[in-house]
Amino acid sequence: MARLPTPGGDNDSWGTVLNDFLQQAFASDGTLVTSATNPYTSTTNTNLANSTRPGLVQLAGDLTTPYSAPKISGLQGNPIATTTPNDGQVLTWSSSNGSWGPATPSGSGLTQAQAMAITSMRI
């Protein structure tokens, strides 16, 4: 099993031990290994995350899979509606639906600059 070098130990093998450790997560070109087989060592990559074991990437809370393009499924455990917002709408909590969703803001004292900032934001 790969390990980090031991300070004060591993005399004359520090580089070998460190390279063995790094090759578990990095390919020979320095990129993260994301395939089931490590292309540098030709061994099974045990650092990949899956539904039962955390690894290089573990999504939790309001983040959902896939790890290569995670999505936000909620805010603080409360779901986000899948309704596509229209221009000028903002993300608003609906206690009747129990979720966050797009809504047109009321004219409750927003300045023009605030309204423009809200309008330009996208989820």
Image (cartoon, helix red, strand yellow):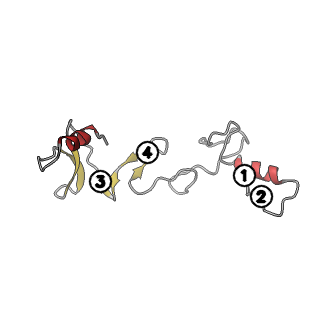
Q: Residue at x 29, y 40 (%)?
A: 121
The residue beneath circle 4 is: 70
The residue beneath circle 1 is: 21
The foreground one among 63 and 112 is 112
Quote the CA–CA distance across marks 2 and 4: 34 Å
Q: Earlier in the sequence, mark 4 or mark 3?
A: 4
The foreground one among 50 and 17 is 17
Amino acid bearing label 1:
Phe
Amino acid bearing label 4:
Pro
Q: Earlier in the sequence, mark 2 or mark 4?
A: 2
- For label 2, the SS is loop
Say few, some or many: other residues with alpha carbon within 10 Å of mark 3 (under 14 / 14 to 19 / 20 or more).
some
Quote the CA–CA distance across marks 3 and 1: 40 Å
- For label 4, the SS is loop
Which quarter of the figure has residue 53?
bottom right
The mark closer to the camera, 2 or 4, is 2
Amino acid bearing label 2:
Pro
- Contact, mark 2 vs mark 1 (Cβ under 8 Å): yes
The foreground one among 64 and 43 is 64
The mark closer to the camera, 2 or 3, is 2
Quote the CA–CA distance across marks 4 and 3: 15 Å
Amino acid bearing label 3:
Pro
The image shows residue 103 at horizontal and vertical percentages of 18, 45
- For label 3, the SS is strand
Q: Earlier in the sequence, mark 2 or mark 3?
A: 2
- Contact, mark 2 vs mark 3 (Cβ under 8 Å): no
The residue beneath circle 2 is: 5
Which label was assigned to residue 79? 3
